[in-house]
Amino acid sequence: MTRASTTRLEAFSDGVFAIAITLLIFGIRVPVIVGPEISEELKRQLLSLWPGYLSFAVSFTMIGIFWIAHHHMFRLIARSTRPLLWLNKAFLMCVSFLPFPTAILGLYGKQRISVILYCATLMIAAVALYILWIYASSVGKLLYSGVSPRVVRVVGRRILGGCLLYGVRAVICEFDGKSRVSCPDPVLLLHAEFCGSLHRRRLLVNVTQQIPGKYLDVAGVPAVVDEMRRTSRS
């Protein structure tokens, strides 16, 4: 099976993320006012659009979180295969669908089905990302040779944890008639903490296939000095 660099895959993915995050703003409609009292009516209608502002902010953050997770994940993936390309496209399809439930949530935020649809979309996207990681780390064996099993487990658990949180949020909404996406939403905060801890955690990876003898953390920042200090203490 032909194996290639992930450069084009990442470039295509970044383009889809950029388009999806831009389309979110189209869910907020510009008020059309007819009549003499334009100033007061415009103020009233702009204030009435607050559910749209909220859903936009939450979805902008969620797509950003998915992009951060995707970005860090591909720091660990050395090469691509045809199955990986298709799995990545499936994940991107979920991301590009997110502007639709976002617009529905902005218009009908008080309806339980709107919140359930939104959470279900996030959950399916997280599942797609988890399957992508499982294939890259276990089935396809596409990671750099220095990636430890601990790193594989940590990344997989955190992605799966986000998926479970979205499911729990949807179930809570189903049994709580007053439930709706609020800001800050607990699910949003927990998933943001997941990505933040993944970014901060110094998980050293020996990327012998690209930079022999050097170490990179998950964010791709050189950590040679830290490794030298650790070695000198021992």
Image (tube, rainbow, N blue to C red):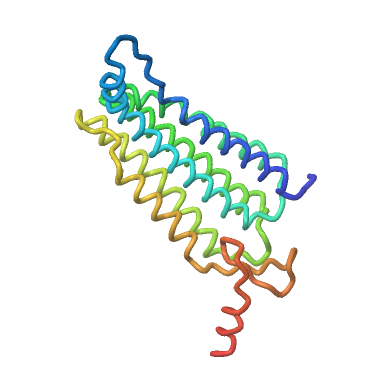
Task: Identify the residue at image location x=67%, y=49%.
Answer: 140
Q: Residue at the far bottom: name it.
A: 233
Total marks shown come to 0
Whether residue 156 sits left or right of residue 214 in the image: it is left
Task: Identify the residue at image location x=54%, y=43%.
Answer: 131
From the viewer's side, name the closer residue of 35 and 205. 35
Relative height, residue 47 to residue 81 (above, below): above
Q: Residue at the far right: name it.
A: 2
Residue 163, given in percent of the width and then of the height, sits at 42, 43
Q: Residue at the far top: name it.
A: 35
Residue 149, given in percent of the width and then of the height, sits at 56, 63
From the viewer's side, name the closer residue of 137 and 108. 108
Residue 99, given in percent of the width and then of the height, sits at 47, 29
Task: Identify the residue at image location x=50%, y=56%.
Answer: 155
Task: Identify the residue at image location x=56%, y=55%.
Answer: 72
The quadrant the C terminus occupies is bottom right
The quadrant the N terminus occupies is top right
Relative height, residue 170 to residue 136 (above, below): above
Whether residue 4 sits left or right of residue 103 in the image: it is right
Whether residue 216 sits left or right of residue 158 in the image: it is right
Q: Residue at the far front: name it.
A: 36
Residue 195, given in percent of the width and then of the height, sits at 45, 54
From the viewer's side, name the closer residue of 98 and 1. 98
Residue 167 figure quarter: top left
Residue 157 figure quarter: bottom left
